[in-house]
């Protein structure tokens, strides 16, 4: 496996993007919700005791990858790189940690 930057991933993933441009953003947001649901549903079976984590590990990784594809395409539609999305998130979390609000709730903390 080779090293890949988030931006490399985003560019390569864009080559597989096939959806109606006129509804791109809502399509992608709903797609992400669907994939996140699939990820949650697979893990729910671990919590319920139907499966061991080792039995669903590969499927969880695949579903996380599907979520990542949708996030990358959402970023593309918003005109921002995936690395910028990640950097903004790290800055936000660092500020919350510094302000001792990391465990709070809400967007403004």
Image (cartoon, rainbow, N blue to C red):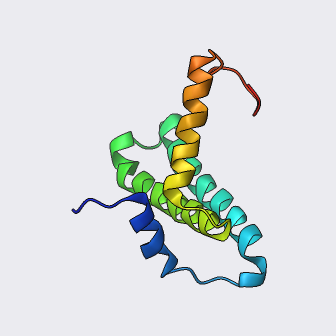
Left or right of residue 81, residue 99 in this image = right
Name the residue: 49% across, 81% down: 16
Name the residue: 23% across, 63% down: 2
The extreme left residue here reads 1
Q: Nearer the viewer, residue 73 or 59?
A: 73
Q: Nearer the viewer, residue 100 or 56?
A: 100
Q: Nearer the viewer, residue 81 or 27?
A: 81
Above/below status of 91 relative to 4: above
* Image quadrant where one finds the N terminus: bottom left
* Image quadrant where one finds the C terminus: top right
- Residue 41, position as x, y percentages in the image: 58, 50
Name the residue: 62% across, 24% down: 96
- Residue 102, position as x, y percentages in the image: 61, 22
Q: For residue 54, which quarter of the picture?
A: top left
- Residue 38, position as x, y percentages in the image: 58, 56
Name the residue: 61% across, 34% down: 92
- Residue 26, position as x, y percentages in the image: 76, 68
Above/below status of 87 relative to 102: below
The extreme top residue here reads 100
């Amino acid at each position: 496996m080779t090293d890949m930057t988030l931006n490399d991933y985003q560019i390569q993933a864009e080559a597989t993007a096939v959806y109606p441009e006129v509804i791109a953003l809502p399509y992608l947001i709903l797609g992400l919700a669907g994939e996140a649901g699939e990820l949650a549903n697979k893990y729910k079976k671990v919590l319920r005791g139907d499966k061991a984590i080792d039995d669903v590990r590969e499927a969880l990784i695949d579903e996380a990858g599907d979520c990542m594809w949708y996030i990358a395409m959402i970023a593309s539609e918003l005109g921002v790189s995936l690395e910028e999305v990640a950097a903004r998130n790290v800055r936000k979390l660092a500020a919350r940690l510094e302000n001792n609000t990391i465990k709070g709730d809400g967007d403004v903390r």
